[in-house]
Amino acid sequence: MNKLFKVGLIGCGHIAETYFRAHKYFNNFKIIKCADIKRKAAEKCAKTYNIKALSVGEILKDKEIEIILNLTVPKAHYKVAKSALEHNKHVYSEKPMAININDGKLLLKIAKNRKLYIGNAPDTFLGGGNQMSKNLLEKKSIGKINLGNAIFAFPGVQSYHPDPEPWFAKKEGGPVIDMGPYYITALVNLLGPAKEVRANLMKGVNYRKIGIGPKKGKKIKVHCPTTYLSTIVFENGTIIRLTLSFDVVAHQRNHIELYGTKGSIIVPDPNMFGGSVFICTKLGNPWKEFKTQKMPLGKINIRSKSLRANESSTNANYRGAGLAEMAYCIENKKKHRCSGELSLHVLDIIQSTMKAAKSNKVQKILTTCNKPKSFTLKEIKKILN
């Protein structure tokens, strides 16, 4: 039986409910206390989930807590993660690990010096959709991958998030920081590390209107670019065109398509855990479907309709898998997949994309990482209830 790690949550906002639901799926962690800079938010969370509310300072010093789950806003990720490590606690943060690469490097240095684990979302690449794609690619089902397209494009988080201001802030806002981690992490999982990027940007409307919650109807100012068009060159020679936009009402393109010497593959939504994979190996032939609905982290598990972007009765959502996998690796002294090294490399690509777009110059990716190993059925079963 796995050790049950006691987790302290910092940041009781919109995404917290998803991690509490993860208790149903995973057997080796439990959120027992929570904190937030807004005391009322912590108290509401504690009441909802029958746990104890503390101040941020108290939860960091609490000797019972072994892992800090950092669900704060992006600009606070670094500060909270650093404090957790300095209090000798492992830390798992929502994406991105920080909003600048130097902070990310410092987090890795502190974790290494203190022999602590640092993990980061997204963990969606551990799900059935991306893992099925990975298995097919590693079997050379479509030969050597030469190029591909990836796209995330929709009107913006203001439609479903009650507090969307950070997504349009000057330093932490924009689609590259928000959705880039899902797409870039998925691509690194499939293709390995990247070596350079070039990009262009644009800014859509100057104001957005909040569509939900107590501030519904309020207009907020946009302080950042809201569309990035980039070209990423990977170390293996693959070239990917990646579009990330908050300015598109609707489109009919696939999330990720990769083109190889023997065929093409459609990779499902990297913001989700499941979804079918499709392969075509001859011009004019039908696409062959590889379903993931029977895979442990691909089964549809969301039955109720929700306004959340990642909540749908047609999707698999097992957020928390990365935290559970990290906890298992802590106990067994193994290398976890949602690692600080992977997250730092993804952050490097994110920051380089934004810099390339602003400067109109090619940016070299200065970090690298190991391509994550496949998440096997045997390994997955060890952390499932």
Image: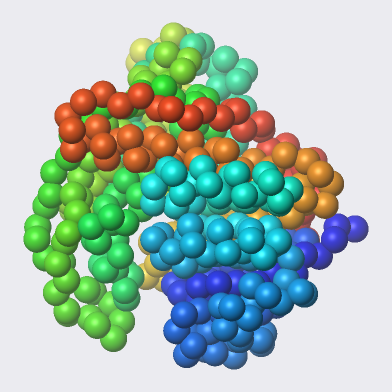
How many marks on residues?
A: 0
Q: In which quarter of the view is residue 156 placed?
A: bottom left
State left or right for residue 300 relative to residue 116.
Answer: left
Q: Which residue occupies the extreme right position in the image?
A: 1
Residue at the location (47% across, 67% down)? 72
Q: Residue at x 11, y 52 (%)?
A: 204
Residue 278, position in %: x, y?
47, 30
- Return the x and y of residue 374 as percentages of the image width and height: 66, 33
In the image, 118 versus 94, the foreground residue is 118
Which of the 4 quarters of the picture holds residue 319? bottom right
Quarter holding the C terminus is bottom right
Q: Is residue 269 above or below residue 237?
A: below
Q: Point out the residue furthest to the top here.
A: 261
Could you tell whether 139 is left or right of 307 in the image?
right
Image coordinates of residue 324 in percent, x first then y, are 70, 56
Q: Does the rendering let one see residue 35?
A: yes
Rendered residue at 39%/47% (across/down): 100
The residue closer to the viewer here, 140 or 373, is 373
Q: Nearer the viewer, residue 217 or 314?
A: 217
Residue located at (56% from left, 78% from top): 56
Looking at the image, is 57 positioned above or below residue 227?
Answer: below
> x, y percentage for residue 268?
45, 40
Left or right position of 63 against 247: right
Work out whether residue 133 can be spotted.
no
